[in-house]
């Protein structure tokens, strides 16, 4: 299959954003998480946290309590590691058991477990007896700062998290963003009986989930969307699915790598002009932009989040959010919510001057920044710097 650059952009944006145009309420949130495979959780809160921001852009009446209802009451989602820490559909639980099976699979986790494994049983017993608990229910037994990566962190806090990764505990709610843990057997009674899918089944799951989320993807995209099988197994499984006709290979203009699409993908069904004059302020952790190499290949957009670099090295700002206009990424915006004054501060905008001068863009900009300000509990917004490129 040959795909033009414009078709590739429209296909991936249709899968990532436009198909959720009618999504609403708690069921709309669940639909987004199901179709995207996961929604990443992040702690940074200069504006609403990433998971809320991602859902705001897809669910028309989104409210943060929707997530906690799905997690705590409906138990249709859970927290685990996908591309990163994320909200994941509960139906995908069996495929993530490989991480629990391989626990501990990191050097610092192994060291901590060896040093503090005596904490595990008392913590599990307390939760079994008292019900769901969070970190605040456990005292800090650390006397001095450790030279290990966990430093001053409360030992019980780390053990709670490791018992979650191990599969003994599961997050059942968030209380002021603090995880509340319960025994997995209370949420998924038969979790120990759930069969661990084979290497090939997990690879098929990765491929299917990636293509269902993005519309088209390279092998590299698949390996970075959700990591549950080794690369060589994903490669072998791709060839197997191609041979069976379940997926098709595709080439995009001027892109060296091969892409893959589901066999029933029909570009002819895509509307000619599916993207209205709408502006999206995307979270740096939005599913549509999280695979950075993909952005360069499909959108010719080079992007790196700058909160992780020293201020002197920043060009676009601490929380530089990509701007999506129609079917192109056209610039970046660095916002910060001043919650005391209820003012959304736009520290800087970097954008193509031809785009900035369009009346249709200005109208969309005014509408979206006002909407985004309200979502962040702000009544006004201020733009400090505009950089036209």
Image (spheres, grey):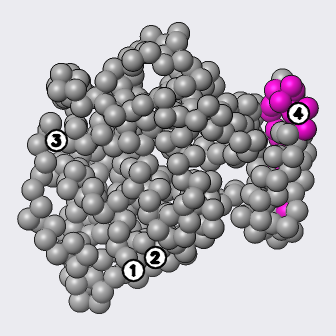
Say whether disc 3 or disc 2 marks the residue closer to the N-terminus: 2
Q: Which residues are magenta?
A: 343-359
Closer to us: 87 or 154: 87
Are the residues tagged 1 and 4 within 8 Å (C-beta)? no
Would you call the spot at circle 4 few (<14 residues within 10 Å), some (14-19), or many (20 or more)? Answer: few
Residue identifier under label 4: 358
SS at circle 1: helix
Q: Secondary structure at mark 3?
A: helix
Label 2 belongs to which residue? 69
Mark yes or no: residue 158 visible. Answer: no
Q: CA distance from mark 4 to mark 3?
A: 49 Å
Instruction: Identify whether 267 is placed above or below 372.
Output: above
Evaluate if marks 3 and 2 touch, with contact meaning CB atoms under 8 Å apart: no
User: Where does residue 176 sit, x and y in percent of width and height?
Assistant: 55, 75
User: What percent of the width, then of the height, locates residue 119?
Assistant: 24, 71
Mark 1 lies on residue: 73
Q: CA distance from mark 1 to mark 3?
A: 30 Å
Q: Which residue is denoted by mark 3 in the rendering?
A: 201
Q: CA distance from mark 2 to mark 4?
A: 42 Å
Mark 1 or mark 4, which is nearer to you? Answer: 4
Q: Which residue is depicted at the point 29% across and 90% down?
A: 130
Residue 350 painted magenta = yes
């Amino acid at each position: 299959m040959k795909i033009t650059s414009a078709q590739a952009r429209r296909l991936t944006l249709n899968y990532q954003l436009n198909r959720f145009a009618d999504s609403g309420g708690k069921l709309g949130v669940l639909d987004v998480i199901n179709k995207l495979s996961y929604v990443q959780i992040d702690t940074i809160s200069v504006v609403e946290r990433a998971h809320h921001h991602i859902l705001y852009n897809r669910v028309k009446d989104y409210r943060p309590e929707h997530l906690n209802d799905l997690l705590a009451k409906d138990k249709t989602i859970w927290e685990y590691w996908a591309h990163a820490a994320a909200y994941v559909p509960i139906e995908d639980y069996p495929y993530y058991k490989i991480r629990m099976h391989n626990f501990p699979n990191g050097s610092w986790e192994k060291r901590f477990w060896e040093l503090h494994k005596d904490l595990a049983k008392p913590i599990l017993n307390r939760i079994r007896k008292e019900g769901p608990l969070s970190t605040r229910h456990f005292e800090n037994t650390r006397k001095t700062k450790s030279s290990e990566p966990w430093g001053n962190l409360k030992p019980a806090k780390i053990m709670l998290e490791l018992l979650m990764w191990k599969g003994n505990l599961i997050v059942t709610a968030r209380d002021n963003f603090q995880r509340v843990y319960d025994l997995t057997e209370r949420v998924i009674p038969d979790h120990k009986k759930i069969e661990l899918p084979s290497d090939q089944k997990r690879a098929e799951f990765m491929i299917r989930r990636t293509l269902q989320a993005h519309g088209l993807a390279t092998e590299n995209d698949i390996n970075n969307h959700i990591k549950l099988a080794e690369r060589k197994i994903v490669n072998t499984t791709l060839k197997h699915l191609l041979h069976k006709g379940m997926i098709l290979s595709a080439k995009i203009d001027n892109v060296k790598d091969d892409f893959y699409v589901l066999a029933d993908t029909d570009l002819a069904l895509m509307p000619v002009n599916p993207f209205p004059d709408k502006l999206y302020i995307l979270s740096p952790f939005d599913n549509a932009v999280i695979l950075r190499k993909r952005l360069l290949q499909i959108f010719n957009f080079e992007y790196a989040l700058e909160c992780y670099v020293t201020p002197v090295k920043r060009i676009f700002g601490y929380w530089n959010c990509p701007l999506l206009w129609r079917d192109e990424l056209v610039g970046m915006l660095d916002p910060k919510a001043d919650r005391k004054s209820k003012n959304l501060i736009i520290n800087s905008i970097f954008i193509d001057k031809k785009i900035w001068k369009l009346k249709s863009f200005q109208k969309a900009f005014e509408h979206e920044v006002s909407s985004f300000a309200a979502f962040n509990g702000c009544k006004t917004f201020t733009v400090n710097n505009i950089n036209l490129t």
